[in-house]
Image: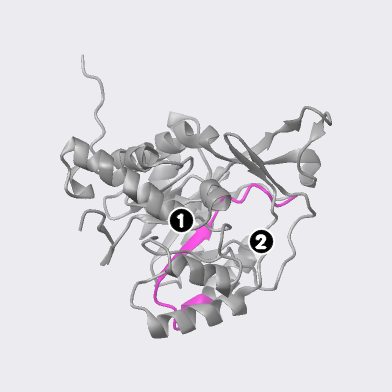
Amino acid sequence: MMFEVTFQNYTFQSPLMNASGVHCMTSEELNGLIDSRAGTFITKSVTRQKRQGNPEPRYYETTLGSINSMGLPNLGFDYYLDYVNEYQKNFSTPMFFSVASMSMQENIETLKKLEDSDFHGFTELNLSCPNVAGKPQVAYDFALTEQILTEIFSFYTKPLGVKLPPYFDIAHFDQIATILNKFPLTFVNSINSVGNGLIIDPDKEQVVIKPKEGFGGIGGEYIKPTALANVRAFYTRLNPSIQIIGTGGIVSGQDAFEHLLCGASMLQIGTQLYKEGTSVFARILDELAVIMDTKGYSNIQQFQGKLKTIEE
């Protein structure tokens, strides 16, 4: 009971799940998430056809996190839809299906296929992939974001949320929240990696990943303060019906606690899952339990969203 969270009309036994892109490429990896202490899981971001992604090396670990420029490698829409259909025959817990194609028109075509399918879980539309060469992040273009969501909600009736890049300005929080509040979104996932960072190998005096001359998305501990700020900003600005998935810098139970305190309902783990494997979910939940016991909380709802500010 301690870790139960209500997400729309479902109760998950844990708020933790993988971030799309990590431990979710193959059916074997997805099955490993089912067998872990994650509350649910999400597929790899799909494109209509199978993609190899960017040339390697395209992922690099550092002490404080990671840099990547993966380029949406995946096994194609049909592979993941087949997996989902089989999963739904055997499990009642809803899962998440990630859509992040090479163009918004392809995203719309994919969503139309998903609308016509038997999938009845949650859909995450990635408006923030920072690692496709030549493609800007859609969610930084507010007019385009509104245009796309208008088109999508003209036909898509299943629970849909959007994965967003980090925002860094209060005015931008206000502007994008105003747009998102116009639509029947189920959730917002905040944040994707911080785009276009650069990490240098000091011995070789060169960048550590090959695509985009070494520029890539930063994840892990580096980005937790930015992630918390975005979670809090959207929790206080979005319609109460739009829940928040907190992503970014969750390494420990304390990190999970802070995301929940800022208002997140679910939590996605990427870099640390890549480093540690699926045992990360049990460790973080055990650490979270100790924090909650120490503070006298018997369930997440007692502190979720109740971040205090300093009054005069």
Q: How far apart are marks 2 and 1 (CA)?
A: 35 Å
**Segment tinted magenta in the rendering:** 113-133
Q: Could you tell me which residue is drawn at 42 percent across and 63 percent down? A: 36
Using residue 128 as the reference point, say whether residue 34 is left or right of it.
Answer: left
Q: Which of marks 2 and 1 is in front?
A: 1
Mark 2 Cα shell of 10 Å, populated few (<14), some (14-19), many (≥20): few
Q: Quadrant of residue 219?
A: top right
Circles 2, 1 touching at the beta carbon (< 8 Å)? no
Q: Which of 255 and 278 is in front in this view?
A: 278
Can see residue 134? yes
Whether the magenta-drawn stretch holds residue 115 is answered as yes
Q: Horizontal and vertical percent for residue 136?
A: 66, 47
Q: Horizontal and vertical percent for residue 198?
A: 70, 34
Q: In which quarter of the image is residue 293?
A: top left
Mark seen at residue 279: 1
Using residue 275 as the reference point, say whether residue 283 is left or right of it.
Answer: left
Q: Is residue 84 above or below residue 144?
A: below
Residue type at mark 1 is Ser
Q: Could you tell me which residue is drawn at 40 percent across and 72 percent down? A: 121
Q: Horizontal and vertical percent for residue 202?
A: 77, 27
- Residue to which mark 2 is pinned: 103
Mark seen at residue 231: none
